[in-house]
Image (tube, rainbow, N blue to C red):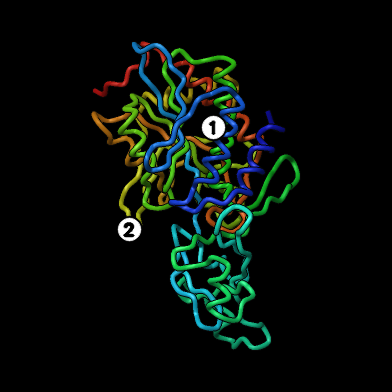
Amino acid sequence: MIATLRQDLTRLMMTVGLSGHEERVAADIRSELDKLGQASSVDRLGNVITTFQGDPGLPSAMLFTHMDQLGFFVRKIEADGLIRVERMGGVSERAMAAQAVTLCIQPGYDVNGIIINKAHHATSVDDKYKVLTAPEIHIDVGCSSKSAVEAFGIKIGTPVVYRPQVIELAKNRIAGTSVDDRAGCAVLLSVARQLIKSPANCTVHLVWSVQEEFNLRGAVVAAQMLNPDIAMQIDLMQATDTPDMADRGDMVLGKGPGMSLYSFHGRGTLNGTIPHPAMVNLLETAAKNARIHLQRSAQVGVLTDLSYVQTVGRGIASIDIGFPMRYSHSTIECCDLGDLRDLTYLTVEALKMVTTDLKLERG
């Protein structure tokens, strides 16, 4: 499984897909499902959905993860050929300077660029410690005029992402662009393979959602259509095993998947998730049965689309699960393939434990 996860994750990390422009990622996922003989569909917003039908008398489950990545949109092309952008999603502005980017035109016609960084020899003492905001940066694609830039097909609204890269590290660790949440996408493909071999008793909907980084939109539409009884969302868990994160919790890279007991954004979007107790118990029991170490997270500053999915219809019994990840929303993120493997096993075990004994009523 590790080898397949590495292959899937590498391919998906190298595929561009800014929020609202996830078509290439969706095409890759649907192609893999086709190879497995598993039918899929795409809704009007762009979510990829495949369903494993089970006993209609059991609670149905929706397991989902997002396909999109953060980045920028072109807002202006200057007369000198430099490009101005607006930030899309929670881009870390501290990480922008001097980074390589890809301006996404269409497959085979994407354009490389760099975010310009003032020459160090000409930088004042004050400028050395100043972080530019996204509206202040310029992107250089090598052109010296607006018309030359436009000849490439670049225009206002063109998506821009950090140039895709994958870096193999020691001990089955992978670093690079858009680990958030292409790692989740790879896990969901892995779950699909397991369910084909050994189905759960309940109906399981797998959803690769869109526009999570843009105000958490896609998964809500899927949930409204599928109307599941339970929902499990796969995303990163903030690893806290580096010096800069040591006071934030006990989430260790390479020590197994995690579940969130509390999340709250706390900035702008005042939303979050407190998981359903039946789901917490289900995951804890599944981890015990599968002999998987399950880590726990409680974080402010974290938000997933589950916060909106849980309120659909009569309410959905929900929980966030995921993989430890370092350096979130930077140009280089990092995860451990062993955690992705164990997250697959944990999820499949939990789905197989959905029986009539699972009590979703509260009180």
Residue at 49%, 75% in the rendered image:
77
Residue 105 — which label? none
Q: Which mark is residue 268?
A: 2
Q: Residue furthest right?
A: 170
Nearer to us: label 2 or label 1 = 1
- SS state under label 2: loop
Q: Residue 188 bears which disc, if any? A: 1
* Dot 2 amino acid type: Gly
SS at mark 1 in the image:
helix
Residue sitting nearer the eye, 273 or 42 = 42
Residue 108 figure quarter: bottom right
Q: Where does residue 6 sit, x and y in percent of width and height? A: 68, 38
Tell me the kind of residue under disc 1.
Answer: Leu
Give how far apart the Cα atoms at labels 2 and 1 are.
Answer: 30 Å
Q: Are dots 2 and 1 in contact, CB under 8 Å? A: no
- Return the residue nearer the eye: 121 or 253: 121
In front of the other: 334 or 145: 145
